Structures are given as structure tokens and as C-alpha cells.
Image (cartoon, rainbow, N blue to C red):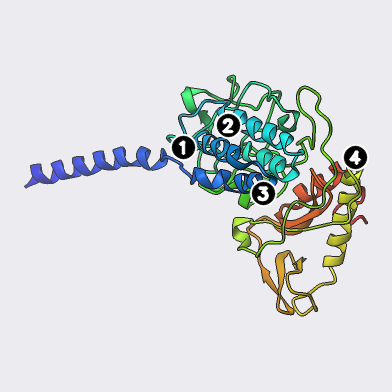
């Protein structure tokens, strides 16, 4: 009996030892089709026809764990090149920039190396993928360690916080979540027009984001609101000022404030949408708050859950002074 008990103890200890690493080194997957759906819809709307789906399908495959380091960027380039042939469609360009920053699958909870080749289109300059929150920031695919080539985005000497990207500066993205459900702006580092070969700037456009049904802010889903921005070339500063005005106006709102159906706002740090004639407020996730942000590629603003630091930085990047509210 003593021998049998000892054997059982040994087998149990061995199984625990084997199980622990496996639980830590899990595969991190996502619905890659969802990453390209919004871009493909924008492409169809812009008149891309049969050219849209092949590019979109290829793009979805570049988010798999075995894709090349620059395959995702190559697909984003193809998306933007087609957008330029369709009158520089702003929705297609913005969604391609966001796609370029979508986290990729991880084979065993290790970080994904960054592309070390410059993109063909300047709209992608400075953009790189976020990492999923479940990956180990100190270990990369291929056994790479921090400091090795590919462990930092092209041209960067540091990345803080680790796993962040221009569209999601607060840190990594929750495992399996699509970036295009969290943000409507590709980030302040994204160029709004032109190509690596010096193409003409995109024409001015009204806010490309459509009013959306509010979703739980725990997933940081963004809702948008059009602004009163000026023409291309000067709308960035106006966007910043419009965002400040909205943030200032939100301070006087409460859940009992009158509103019109579909109106969106921030109330006591939560995302609010007017349903009927009353505001329905959804709280933002831990460490985040609701704020109006300036759009990057077109005139207008967005209302979303983000951090105070991120909101302040995005407004400052437009040239507007005075912080979140302009005070």
C-alpha cells in the first residue's frame, strides 16, 4: 500500500508539472474574418466590386500565427492602394490603417515580431500591430528576446507600454478582440494621405464614422459623432477644438438631462446614448473614461472609452491647447 501511495503521489506531481507550462503557453486565436469585414464593406460601398473580396480574404490570412512578419503590412498596403484608385476613399484608408495594427495570433503565448520593412504607402508609416494581452512581452516567436531585431517596431528604440500600438496606446488588446471594435481612429501617428511615391492628398470628407448602437464599455467599443471640422489641410486643429468643446459640454450633463434619440455623450465618465428621450449610460472599463477625441483622417470627432492620458495626447497632437476641455 505504501508503494502504491508513493507511486500515486509521484504521478500526481508529474502531471501538475506538465500541466502548468501548457496552461501558461496557450495558443491565442481570433476570428480573423472579422478583422477585414468592415474594410470589405467600405470597399464595396466605394465601388470596388470584385476587387474587394480577394484582398480582404488574403488580409485575414495574414493574422494567422504562421504568416510572415510583413504579410499583414503588405495586405494593408494592398487595401490602401485600391482605396486610392477609388477616389482616395477615406473609410477604406482609415480601416486599412486600423487593420495594420490588429494583433496577430500567437502560437504559444509569445509575442509576434514586428515588420522591419517600410510600407509602400506613407499612410502606414509609423504603424505596427498591437500585441494580445496574453502574450509574454519578454519572449517572441523564433526565440527572439527583447533587443533582437524584430522585437521593436521599425525605427523605434523603445515601446511603452509594451504591446501597445498608435491606435491603442493604453497597452495590449484583450485576447481575441478586434481592434476595429475598440477604436475608430488609427492613431495620431498615422498619415492621412499620400503614398510612398508622393501621391496627392486625399480630399476633405465629413466624419466617416456612422452613429452606432452603444455596446458595453468593458470591451471599450467606440461610438462616433460628426464634428464641424474645416476642409482638408486644416481640419486636424478644428477637430481638436471640437473635441474640447464636447468634453467641456459633457460636464453639465446627467442621466436626467434631456436628449434627442441617437445622441451620444459622456456622463460621469461613462459612455451615454439617448434612447427615446433618456440617456442610457454604460460604464467604461477599469482605468478608462469616456471622452471625445479628434478624428485623424477626416473632419469630425469620436466618443469612446479611453485613458485620460491618451485623450489628452490625441487632442494635443492636433495643435489644440488647454487639455481635454480647452481650459
Q: Which residue is mark 3?
A: 45
Q: Are marks 1 and 4 in contact (CB under 8 Å)?
A: no
Residues packed near mark 1 inside 10 Å, few (<14), some (14 to 19) or many (20 plus): many
Q: Are marks 2 and 3 in contact (CB under 8 Å)?
A: no
Q: Quadrant of residue 160?
A: top right
Which of the two labelled residues, at mark 2 and mark 3, occupies the earlier sequence position?
3
Which of the two labelled residues, at mark 1 and mark 4, occupies the earlier sequence position?
1
Residue toward you, 126 or 119: 119
Q: Are marks 3 and 4 in contact (CB under 8 Å)?
A: no
Residue toward you, 160 or 218: 218
In this view, 17 is above or below 327: above
Depth check, mark 2 against mark 3: the one in front is: 3
Depth check, mark 1 against mark 3: the one in front is: 3
Which of the two labelled residues, at mark 1 and mark 3, occupies the earlier sequence position?
3
Residue 233 visible from this viewpoint: yes
The residue under the point 54% across, 36% down is 54
Q: CA distance from mark 3 to mark 4?
A: 25 Å
Residues packed near mark 3 inside 10 Å, few (<14), some (14 to 19) or many (20 plus): few
Q: Which residue is mark 1?
A: 109
The circle drawn on residue 233 is: 4
Q: CA distance from mark 1 to mark 3?
A: 37 Å
Q: CA distance from mark 1 to mark 2?
A: 19 Å
Q: Which residue is mark 2?
A: 72
Q: CA distance from mark 2 to mark 3?
A: 23 Å
Residue 175 visible from this viewpoint: no
Element under disc 2: helix
Amino acid at each position: 500500500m505504501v508503494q502504491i501511495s508513493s507511486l500515486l503521489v509521484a504521478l500526481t506531481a508529474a502531471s501538475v508539472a506538465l500541466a502548468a507550462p501548457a496552461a501558461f503557453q496557450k495558443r491565442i486565436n481570433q476570428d480573423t474574418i472579422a478583422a477585414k469585414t468592415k474594410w470589405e464593406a467600405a470597399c464595396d460601398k466605394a465601388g470596388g466590386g470584385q476587387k474587394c473580396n480577394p484582398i480582404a480574404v488574403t488580409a485575414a490570412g495574414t493574422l494567422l500565427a504562421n504568416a510572415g512578419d510583413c504579410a499583414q503590412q503588405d495586405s494593408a498596403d494592398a487595401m490602401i492602394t485600391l482605396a486610392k484608385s477609388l477616389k482616395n476613399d477615406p473609410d477604406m484608408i482609415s480601416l486599412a490603417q486600423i487593420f495594420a495594427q490588429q494583433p496577430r495570433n500567437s502560437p504559444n503565448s509569445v509575442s509576434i515580431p514586428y515588420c522591419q520593412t517600410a510600407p509602400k504607402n506613407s499612410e502606414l508609416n509609423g504603424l505596427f500591430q498591437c500585441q494580445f494581452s496574453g502574450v509574454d512581452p519578454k519572449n517572441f516567436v523564433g526565440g527572439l528576446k527583447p533587443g533582437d531585431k524584430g522585437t521593436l517596431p521599425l525605427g523605434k528604440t523603445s515601446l511603452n507600454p509594451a504591446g501597445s500600438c498608435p491606435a491603442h496606446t493604453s497597452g495590449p488588446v484583450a485576447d481575441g478582440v478586434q481592434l476595429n471594435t475598440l477604436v475608430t481612429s488609427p492613431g495620431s501617428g498615422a498619415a492621412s494621405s499620400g503614398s510612398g511615391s508622393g501621391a496627392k492628398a486625399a480630399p476633405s470628407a465629413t466624419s466617416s464614422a456612422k452613429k452606432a448602437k452603444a455596446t458595453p464599455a468593458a470591451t471599450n467599443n467606440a461610438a462616433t459623432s460628426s464634428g464641424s471640422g474645416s476642409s482638408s489641410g486644416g481640419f486636424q486643429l478644428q477637430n481638436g477644438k471640437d473635441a474640447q468643446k464636447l468634453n467641456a459640454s459633457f460636464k453639465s450633463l446627467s442621466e436626467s438631462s434631456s436628449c434627442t434619440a441617437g445622441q451620444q455623450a459622456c456622463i460621469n465618465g461613462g459612455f451615454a446614448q439617448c434612447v427615446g428621450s433618456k440617456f442610457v449610460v454604460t460604464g467604461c472599463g477599469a482605468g478608462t473614461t469616456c471622452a471625445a477625441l479628434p478624428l485623424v483622417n477626416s473632419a469630425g470627432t469620436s466618443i469612446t472609452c479611453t485613458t485620460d492620458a491618451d485623450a489628452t495626447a490625441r487632442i494635443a497632437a492636433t495643435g489644440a491647447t488647454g487639455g481635454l476641455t480647452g481650459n
